[in-house]
Image: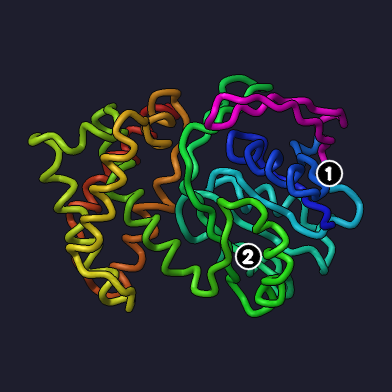
Amino acid sequence: MANWNILGAGAIGHFFAEKLLKSGQHAAFVLRPESDAHIRSFNFENLAGENTTNTVMAQGKLTPKCDFLLVTLKAQDVLPALTLLQSQIDKHCCIVLLHNGMGTAEQTEKLFPRHAIMVGTTSNGVLKVSDDHIRHTGAGVTWLGPFNNQAKRYKDIANQLFALEELAWCEDIRAKLWLKLVINCAINPLTAIHQCKNGELASPALYPHVVKVVQELALVCEKARLPWSYAELQAHVDYVINRTAENYSSMHQDQHFNRQSEIDYITGYVLKVANAYSIPVPANQALYAQIKQQETKLVS
């Protein structure tokens, strides 16, 4: 039985708290350092509409002998939060990063060069209805895998969680992360800019923009030796647009609620890779610039 701490008490953090408790693991939330320790109760509503009540410890520091630190913060908040906790994170603690976008694992490894770092991605839909009510809105799969060699030894421990049918281990997690990145690049900025649901991207007015973005991403993936053709990537994106047609993307919600988005770790990450390979990606560059301009206005 492992001891998990969860850094990030949003919808996904609560979702995994419920799953970890269900599988017999210990779980606790790590809050802001100034937070008072308390017992947190929350109601979890599954896809069938059934409700369970869960109780977890929540405090501003790690619990003793933390085996796994699951980080479900937004990408831009990961490094600042881990920096604050650096002195508390034991060398035997495995750091597990689970969020949209890419680039934080490299940052985390610089901060913790000897630690095992695991990365993951999930396609589960989860809604935080209120502080104490979490709703599972869409079935999906969570993939976990090693970012560095130190994390490869944790495969068997990750297998302990396979009782949760939504979770699986992937030795080549990089491909899974890139596929999720492509989908996010194609959907998130456009839905944020046009303030629309995902399904509206299939309209005649917006779909050509989706195609341009994916065509550029296919060129980047080819140079990065990733295993998909343009047609395969477009099919994945189209499937997600259809399956989540009534959903609002996370970047749409960030724009709607005047919050900073993860654009630097989504489209921004692609721009860095494209620049390294000298690949022009004007459609992605334009979306990045537009989101950054909107965020500047929000801040000012």
Query: What x and y, as percent, mark residue 227?
Result: 31, 74
Whether residues under marks 1 and 2 lie with C-beta atoms below 8 angstroms apart, the answer is no
Residue depicted at x 39% and y 63%: 178
Q: Nearer the viewer, residue 129 or 7?
A: 129
**Which region is colored magenta?**
35-60
Residue 45 is left or right of residue 1, and the answer is left
What residue sits 52% from the left and 29% below the top? 127
Q: Mark 2 highlights which residue?
A: 118
What amino acid is found at the position of numbered circle 2 in the picture? Met
Residue under the image location 32 percent in, 78 percent down: 225
User: How would you rate the neighbour count of disc 2 (Cα within 10 Å): few for under 14, some for 14-19, many for 20 or more?
Assistant: many
Label annotation for residue 24: none
Question: Considering depth in this image, is 22 or 15 the residue closer to the camera?
Answer: 22
**Residue 184, horizontal then vertical, whole percent:** 35, 48
Question: Quadrant location of residue 192?
Answer: top left
Q: What amino acid type is highlighted by mark number 1?
A: Lys
Q: Name the residue under label 1.
A: 61
Identify whether 67 is placed above or below 14. below
Q: Nearer the viewer, residue 157 or 152?
A: 157
Front residue (pair 81, 47)? 47
